[in-house]
Image (cartoon, grey):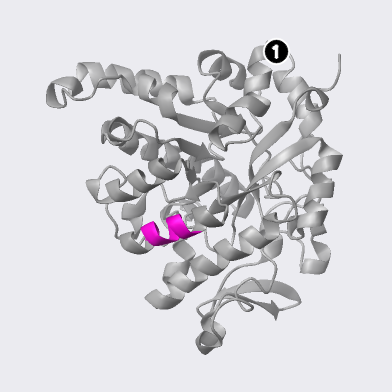
Amino acid sequence: MTDLFDRYRVIDVDTHITEPPDVWTSRVASKWRDLVPHIERRNGEDAWVVGGKEIFRPGFVSMAGFDGTVPEHPATYQDIPASCYEADARLLHMDALGIYAQVLYPNVGGFGSQTFLRLGEPALQLECVSAYNDFLIDWTSADAKRLIAVMALPFWDLQACLDELRRSAANGHRAVLFPSQPHDFGQPALSHKHWDPLWAAAQEADLPISFHIGGQDLSGLAKDRGDIGVKANFARMSSLSFIENCKGLAELIFGGVCHRFPALRFVSVESGAGWIPSLLEAFDWQWRNGGVTKEHPEYDLLPSEYFRRQIYACFWFEQGMIGPALEMYPNNILYETDFPHPTSMSPGPATPALPPREYAARALGHLPEATLAKVLHDNAARVYHMH
């Protein structure tokens, strides 16, 4: 039997760009000086500085192949694989793995653009979002059929969101990144009709909405309340962040967003997928027993049916539960590697992660061909309009 990655044009729906040092310094007006996101060398390591404060070090989000685990990380860009930040090198890396296409997410702006709020200057915040979106189109131009751009949005300003969505869609972006809990940052919750103009614009443009884990305020979750250690606390936070995305899905379904925008697709990114059957069974049970349709007679579907129609989730490491999840929801689950993040399917000498080909053979090889085709290619091709 041939390798799974040889049989299908595999679409990896969650990877990240380690932004090159000049993304913002080369694109944002010089009047903002050192407020603009930039790299500084601190204690022998490269560090991203935003609004005058260090936010993280690029090596921390570029762990593919690294011999160590968090908090250890590559020190400088010279220690990071070029495939993390150079488009041509990324394409070669994809060729070596047997992956046809990758969907691309940021690091510096945060997984919902919330980092830019630190700047405290609305004009600069917007300029930084637009600069990133323009950079991403330039970066993906190395092969726009294989490198899929996901736009950032200034979610703190609805009109600016609408303008940037239309501008970036016209430039070639194929999806929208949005925080799953905007109320963490002083904005209305996803279920609030405040966002309906944005959902309407995305639906009209046929752009899926991506909710990446970490697009919430995770400061509370990140705290080590029991002195358990840095590595244990990072593993705890990384696991529990899946639940934060579950909360966002509940807002979409119970708040009627899926009902009001039936053609709009939503993607829960890097959240795993084995939990889907259990969560949706709970949603349906509480929906019926709670009398939701009596309160909202306009709702014509159960939560699981709204999910089947327009919501997707992504997985990259699960083995025990991914088979049952795919059996129940074969049209709603997408494959990712999370390259090159610390918990990605990008093994280094210090981690037990399997290479993508080996993982796919072990976790998915027993599935029917029709399911394999859907999860490795067809579902993502439908969401992102690929062929």
Q: Tag 1: Cα neighbours inside 10 Å, few (<14), some, or many (≥20)?
A: few
Q: Amino acid at mark 1?
A: Glu
Task: Please tell me whether the stretch drawn in magenta is mainly helix, strand or loop.
Answer: helix
280 or 155, which is in the foreground? 155
239 or 223, which is in the foreground? 239
Query: In the picture provided, is 111 more to the left or to the right than 256?
Result: right
Query: In the picture provided, is 117 more to the left or to the right than 86?
Result: left
Q: Position of residue 157 (x, y in %)?
A: 33, 63
Evaluate whether residue 182 shows in this view: yes
Query: In the picture provided, is 356 more to the left or to the right than 178?
Result: right
Q: Position of residue 289 (x, y in %)?
A: 21, 16
Count of picture labels: 1
Q: Which residue is mark 1?
A: 369
Q: Is residue 318 above or below residue 264?
A: above
71 or 360, which is in the foreground? 360
Image point (71%, 21%), residue name: 363
Quadrant in which the C terminus is drawn? top right
Q: Is residue 162 magenta?
A: yes
The residue segment tinted magenta is 161-167
Q: Secondary structure at mark 1?
A: helix
Image point (46%, 40%), residue name: 206
Image point (69%, 72%), residue name: 21
Q: Quadrant of residue 72?
A: bottom right
Q: Residue furthest left?
A: 295
Quadrant in which the N terminus is drawn? top right
